[in-house]
Image (cartoon, rainbow, N blue to C red):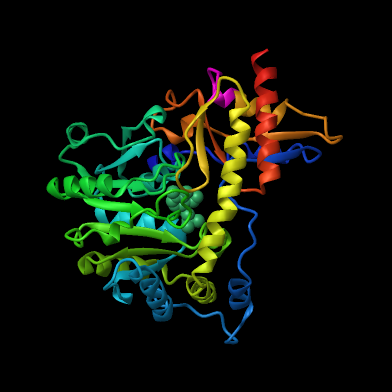
């Protein structure tokens, strides 16, 4: 039986594709630096709200989300972007569904989405489902992954370009775009008639300057769309609650229709999200110091390995590292299938995400890996130490 072209071409997650090898070696303690799944405890307020059943029926919720949840998300964003109300927010099943909805609402088949590369690998999957095409815009590790100047951006625009999409802070780069870059890109996108989709799921995890939300850009109300999520900010990846936010009410009305087609996000999870959104300000300072310690541990340990280049993240908790190897796919497989360190008395190894999965073409990023500093600093330090040892063996 024939499968659709979409099903045939949809890419395997670059982040998860080594999972089967890991599962096949249960005796090995793997330091999982391949996936952005923190071990930070979900706040007790969120857990309590999740546990509280207030009805004997697990009923459907409204298509765009519970009014209380939309209001809580609007109030949360209005702290930095005044004037937002519940009508500007749709509750989605994670930031993932918010991205999918945005692509579906903005792109016709064959339309193009311009994205600074390297980029979050699942953008490819969402684009495939929406029958759109991701067009990569190369940014470079040695230039801090900055967005190129407007004349370079112009070279990528065709009559099919609909969206300029970016993550700020970036995954996998850890780059934070400064205010002037953001304003410049927003102006440029507006002048070219493009939607600006800002993926801000890491916005509260920053180490130098707080990233400006695209919702704060005056004069861009009509073409800015923001994706937010409870996953990373509140260490609630399994809650599957995210938000699609825009002041363009025509766009929001279409998103309501998409929401009607799939029915609403899980109401109990939305109550838990409300509890998260109402946490005190002190929560965010603490969140940043937790990740700063993890990222610092990763940077210090990487500095010990000869021949490795990397970018110190300004936000999120990832780094793209360039290794002195030709094929990081082979190296990542070597880690999960062959490399075992016995120095602690039990076999240990490491899982990393090979670079090519973060590029549009599999021939790019072949000497890069993405590392996630999501576990406690000791585990992160140990993981990177194992990386150094594995590199010696692999190259030898
Ligand atoms: C940049 C980026 N956007 C979106 C998502 C999706 O997050 P969610 O768990 O909210 O679907 C992730 C998850 O890792 C991400 O890194």
Magenta run includes residue 329: yes
Image height check: is 306 above or below 60? above
Give the residue at x 16% y 60%: 219
Counting from the top left corner in percent of width and height, residue 140 is at: 37, 29
Give the residue at x 65% y 61%: 41
Q: Is 228 positioned to the left or the right of 103 in the image?
A: right
Res 71 → quadrant: bottom left
Q: Looking at the rendering, in which quadrant would you find the C terminus? A: top right
Report if residue 2 is visible in the image.
no
Q: Is 261 positioned to the left or the right of 195 in the image?
A: right
Counting from the top left corner in percent of width and height, residue 115 is at: 32, 41
Q: Which residues are magenta?
A: 322-330
Res 61 → quadrant: bottom left
Image height check: is 242 above or below 167? below
Residue lying furthest bottom:
55
Counting from the top left corner in percent of width and height, residue 357 is at: 47, 34
Give the residue at x 47% y 71%: 277
Residue lying furthest left:
191
Give the residue at x 17% y 37%: 158
């Amino acid at each position: 039986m024939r499968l659709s072209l979409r099903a045939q071409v949809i890419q395997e997650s670059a982040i998860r594709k080594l999972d089967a090898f890991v599962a096949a070696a249960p005796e090995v303690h793997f330091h999982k630096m391949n996936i952005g799944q923190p071990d930070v405890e979900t706040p007790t307020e969120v857990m309590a709200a999740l546990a509280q059943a207030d009805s004997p029926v697990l009923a459907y919720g409204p298509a765009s989300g519970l009014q209380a949840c939309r209001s809580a998300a609007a109030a949360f964003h209005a702290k930095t972007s005044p004037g937002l109300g519940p009508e500007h927010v749709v509750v989605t099943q994670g930031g993932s569904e918010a991205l999918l909805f945005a692509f579906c609402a903005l792109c016709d088949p064959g339309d193009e989405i311009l994205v600074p590369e390297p980029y979050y690998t699942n953008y490819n999957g969402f684009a495939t489902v929406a029958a759109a095409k991701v067009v990569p815009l190369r940014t470079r590790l040695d230039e801090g992954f900055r967005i190129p100047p407007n004349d370079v951006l112009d070279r990528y625009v065709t009559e099919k370009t609909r969206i300029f999409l970016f993550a700020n802070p970036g995954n996998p780069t850890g780059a934070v775009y400064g205010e002037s870059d953001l304003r410049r890109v927003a102006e440029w996108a507006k002048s070219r008639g493009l939607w600006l989709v800002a993926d801000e799921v890491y916005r509260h995890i920053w180490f130098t300057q707080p990233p400006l939300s695209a919702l704060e850009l005056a004069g861009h109300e009509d073409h800015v769309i923001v994706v937010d999520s409870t996953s990373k900010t509140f260490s609630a990846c399994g809650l599957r609650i995210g938000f699609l936010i825009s002041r363009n009410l025509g766009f929001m009305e279409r998103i309501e229709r998409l929401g009607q087609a799939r029915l609403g996000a899980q109401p109990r999870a939305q109550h838990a999200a409300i509890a998260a959104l109402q946490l005190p300000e002190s929560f965010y300072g603490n969140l940043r110091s937790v990740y700063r310690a993890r990222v610092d541990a990763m940077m210090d340990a990487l500095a010990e390995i000869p021949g490795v280049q990397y970018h110190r993240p300004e936000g999120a908790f990832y780094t793209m590292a360039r290794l002195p190897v030709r094929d990081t796919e082979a190296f990542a497989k070597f880690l999960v299938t062959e490399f075992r360190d016995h120095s602690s008395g039990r076999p240990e190894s490491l899982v990393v995400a090979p670079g090519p999965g973060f590029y549009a073409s599999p021939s790019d990023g072949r000497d890069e890996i993405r590392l996630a500093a999501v576990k406690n600093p000791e585990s992160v330090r140990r993981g990177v130490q194992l990386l150094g040892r594995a590199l010696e063996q692999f190259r030898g």
